[in-house]
Amino acid sequence: MNTARAWEVLGTVPDPEVPVISVVELGIVREVTVDPAGAVEVVITPTYSGCPAMFEIEKDVRTALEAAGATAVRVRTVLSPAWTTDWIPETAREKLRAYGIAPPGPAERGGLISLVRARPPVPCPWCGSTQTTLKSEFGSTACKAIHVCSSCQQPFDEFKAI
Amino acid sequence: MTAQGHDADEVGIAAGTAQAGDRPVAGASRGPRLGPPLVEFLLRLGDDRLILGHRLSEWCGHGPILEEDIALSNFALDLIGQAASLLRLAGEVEGEGRDEDALAYFRDGVQYRNCLLVEQSRGHFGDTIVRQFLFDAYSALLWESLLGVPHEGLAAIAAKAIKEDRYHLRHSSEWVVRLGDGTPESHGRVQGSLDRLWRYTGELFEADAIDQAVAAQGIVVDHRALRSRWDHLVDDVLGRATLVRPAEGAMQRGGRVGRHTEHLGHLLATMQSVARAHPGARW
């Protein structure tokens, strides 16, 4: 087991709630170190403070690395720098879209907040139409918002920018 | 018990004499017994979010519409997650082996440091939304002022929590406008919520010896500036909502030093019962 191999293994660990992308693509694996004896330390950061999937992710990471030959696995959680959807690469955004989840726009920065949502309508991941309406910025998981498309009449999730 | 009429200067700690890691300071003859300032400061932040998170969780399965049921449960999740980080840090600073679960489940009401606003019963949906808006505006601004503090652990929590609180604030603001500028029925009900809850807002901006002591460690919150920014934000939303800002009257306070309203005890009885019936249980 070396660092490159450990990253490769982590790239196969799916996010438990959005299994179409891996925990690496989600951007929550921040650092991986492997000592000469094959013990691995993985540093992860939570998406949201209360994300209930973190325990599951920690378990999945441990299981996958042990199965791949790591002699010991330590998972450490850090809060800083705070996770942002800007860390999700373009390839993973395409996977989200194909899965029916609109990928996140750019994260809002600086200032406090505009009380009116500044982002233009989110394109429907099913039909591509921009005739869509935000129903709620809180959805089935902490990281998603709910929209509905008036062209194809389908509701859809958006991975919300944060 | 309500806590009207107690002054913040009753807090039994001398400004500027205590540092993080000091042993708890015995209270002055009239005042409550408080711990090291940084621990107290973190408990105030953590308890606000734990108690409000629990109140919001009471809506799970009872929301007026499905989307709101989901939204309020999401708020609860974020706030309880923030509380876990803050209480874990409080326990580490305290150094007596208490983790976030020990602090959440095995302290009694007088040891809780949340503001009175968050412990009030959830009331109707309008009460919940107005309380949430008043708190979100305070919370988002407070995190902003804590972003650059020299305490690494606290700064990291602030940087994470502010992202979540921005979403909360936008959502609760939208609902205040929707209900305030809605039907005569919804307008009247949320104006009533605002009038009833206003007396608990003064406490959010009171600085005491704990604040002075942590300021000496570089954790500086300018309560007057915070108040002025909060006023500006709240007035803006109330204006859009056609709601009338209540006149400044007598303010209730005491939560920061453990003097709570009757509502907290009932909440704790529910929240803590399983952990106390089965201490150390794992599943």
Image (tube, grey):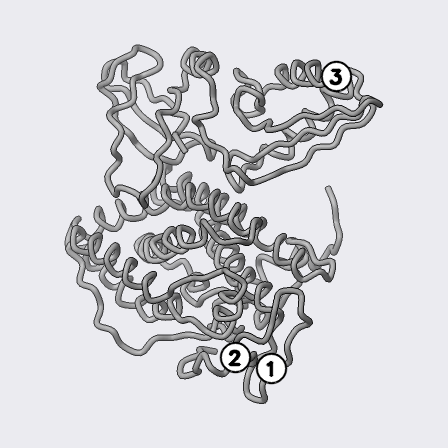
Expressed as whole percent of the image width and height from the top left, the position of residue A79 reads 56, 40
Q: Which residue is mark 3?
A: A2
Q: Residue at x 46, y 12 (%)?
A: A91
Query: B28 above or below B152?
Result: below
Query: Three-letter amino acid code at disc 2?
Result: Val
Residues at marks 1 and 3, common chain?
no
Taking the spot 48% from the left edge, 15% from the top edge, the residue there is A92
Which residue type carries mark 1? Gly
- The residue that disc 1 covers is B27
What amino acid is found at the position of numbered circle 3 in the picture?
Asn
Q: Earlier in the sequence, mark 2 or mark 1?
A: 2
- The one nearer the camera, A1 or B204, is A1
The chain carrying label 3 is A
Between the residue at mark 1 and the residue at mark 3, the CA separation in whole angstroms equals 56 Å
Residue B142, how many percent across, how many down?
Answer: 40, 56
Task: Name the disc covering residue B11, or none.
Answer: 2
Mark 2 touches mark 3? (CB < 8 Å): no
Chain identifier of the residue bearing label 2 in the image: B
**Residue visible at 59% across and 19% down?**
A14
Secondary element at image label 1: loop
